[in-house]
Image: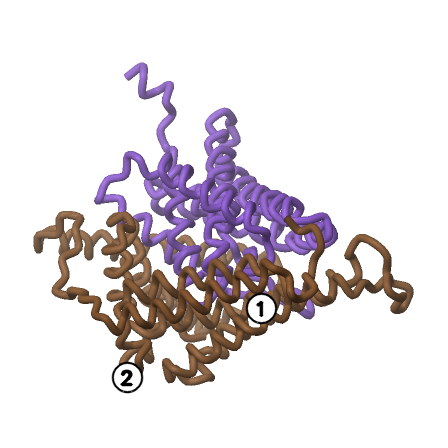
Chain colours: A purple, B brown
Amino acid sequence: MHIADGILSAPVLAAGFGGTAILAAVTMRKMDHEEIPKVSVMSALFFVVNLIHIPIGPTSIHFIMNGLVGVILGKKAFPAIMLGVILQAFLFGFGGVTVIGVNCVMLGGGALAAYFIWQLRHRFLLGDRLEMIFGALAGVTGIFVSGVILALALFLTGEEFLATAGYALTAHIPALIIEAIVVGACASFLKKTKPDLLSGQVRKRILKTS
Amino acid sequence: MSLEIDRFSHIESSVQRWDPRIKILSLGFFIFVVAILKTIPVAVISLLIAIIIIKITNIPFHFVANSIKVIVLFLAPFFLLLPFSYPGEAAFHLIGLPFAWEGLRLAILIFTKAVTIVLTTNAIFGSSRFDISMIALQSLKCPKLLVQMILFTYRYIFVFIDEVKRMEKAMRSKGFVMKANMNTLRTMGNFVGTLLIRSFERTERVYSAMVSKGYQGELHTLVTFEAQGKDFVKAGLIAILTIAVFVTDMINIFHPAIKGWY
């Protein structure tokens, strides 16, 4: 899910860059140099899984995985997505240079929303399936929120894009389902094999009492 | 799809010899102006400018064609959607659907601008080594942290792709076939998880190796840039062209593709 060059109007493009600058400043404020490699790995993952296509009937769709980036990096997901988007624009115009801002807000915003949903898992006791269910919800949230931002950007550009926005939203329903299953499976796999990779492991309440 | 954007940066041409900092600034300015054009003839003129720039760089066409293919696939739906969904009066009806010329015009405008921008991006980043482009960005006051992370990620992408290929081969040799079913998707989830664990472990090793060799979060380089008169002449040329394109678009010699867009 990216928006290409030359569609959006200048105010929307400017708003995208403004929003990206603010979100990047907030999310990168307390970043250590030690975190650079972890963030870069997730950027590379985001970049590469965008190239994996799954056949669905006559067409194929590709992974977006911004929800998974949110699940693993937490707030640092925003810079990770931003790097991925920048490289996609630089290397093969997937998206585009002028829409880097809008794409970052769209996909990175989805990742942050996914992280928020992922954190809600601490309020539930679902046993073994907890990570799978909330991973799936995070995957859905990532794409859904990005889809809404995409539709909003198109709508703000002009009402002639209203139908396109609707099409973009419906076209992502299969991606939504696929992503939910894959992110859910991945989260529960990581919980079993290397749980410290997942973000937001420790409950704050426990930290306070100890 | 080739990700090595700088594969043809060794070819000699006046774009390749251009100081990367000035190249990024002036062609970047051109790109942003193209993005806000409103009339098709002006967009076509800027497309011609972009084609000429690519011609000068001597980057082979098949290399550029890859990125154009992505754009075409991406924008194809617009040609189907916009003419039939443009608000206002329809010119005629096609199989019962209202067809508006304005919508088609808008789709053509979007397509022309997108191809122009992709070509120019290829000219910017295809004409110097990627690390040098990034160092140029750093000397243009891009945040250091950001530039380093871009370089790290660029490096990891190739490592990642190799890893993906290796793991895919292992899965295929064990009889895995990609299908549209639950099992495939769950396997994909585990695949991504394994990929992550392997990559993180590798990264940690690489990072400790870097730290033990004195890495302190700063990029030191022997590359120095020196802008000469020629570089500024090229920049001036692009600036004049860009402003000319912008002014022609603004004074509306041609019929704008969309009325009341702004």
Residue name at image x 62 percent, y 66 percent: B75
Cα distance in 3D space between marks 2 and 1 = 29 Å
Chain containing mark 2: B
Q: Which mark is residue B43?
A: 1
- Which residue type carries mark 2? Glu
Outermost residue, left direction?
Answer: B213
Is B198 in front, or is A169? Answer: A169
Residue name at image x 50 percent, y 65 percent: A52
**Drawn side of residue B57 relative to residue B104, left or right:** left
Residue name at image x 64 percent, y 65 percent: B253
Let me know if residue B201 appears in the view: no
Q: What x and y, as percent, mark residue B10?
A: 27, 81
Let me know if residue A42 appears in the view: yes
The N terminus of chain B: image quadrant: bottom left
Q: Which mark is residue A33?
A: none
Is A187 in front, or is B214? Answer: B214
Q: What x and y, as percent, mark residue A49?
A: 46, 60
Residue name at image x 52 percent, y 77 percent: B48
Chain containing mark 1: B
- Which residue type carries mark 1? Ala
Quickly name the residue at label 2. B12
Q: What x and y, as percent, mark residue A170?
A: 70, 52
**Drawn side of residue A7 relative to residue A129, left or right:** right
The image shows a total of numbered marks equal to: 2
Local secondary structure at mark 2: loop
> Are callouts 2 and 1 both on one chain?
yes
Local secondary structure at mark 1: helix
Disc 2: CA contacts within 10 A as few (<14), some (14-19) or many (>=20): few
Q: What x and y, as percent, mark residue B68?
A: 53, 74
Q: Could you tell which of marks 2 and 1 lies nearer the N-terminus?
A: 2
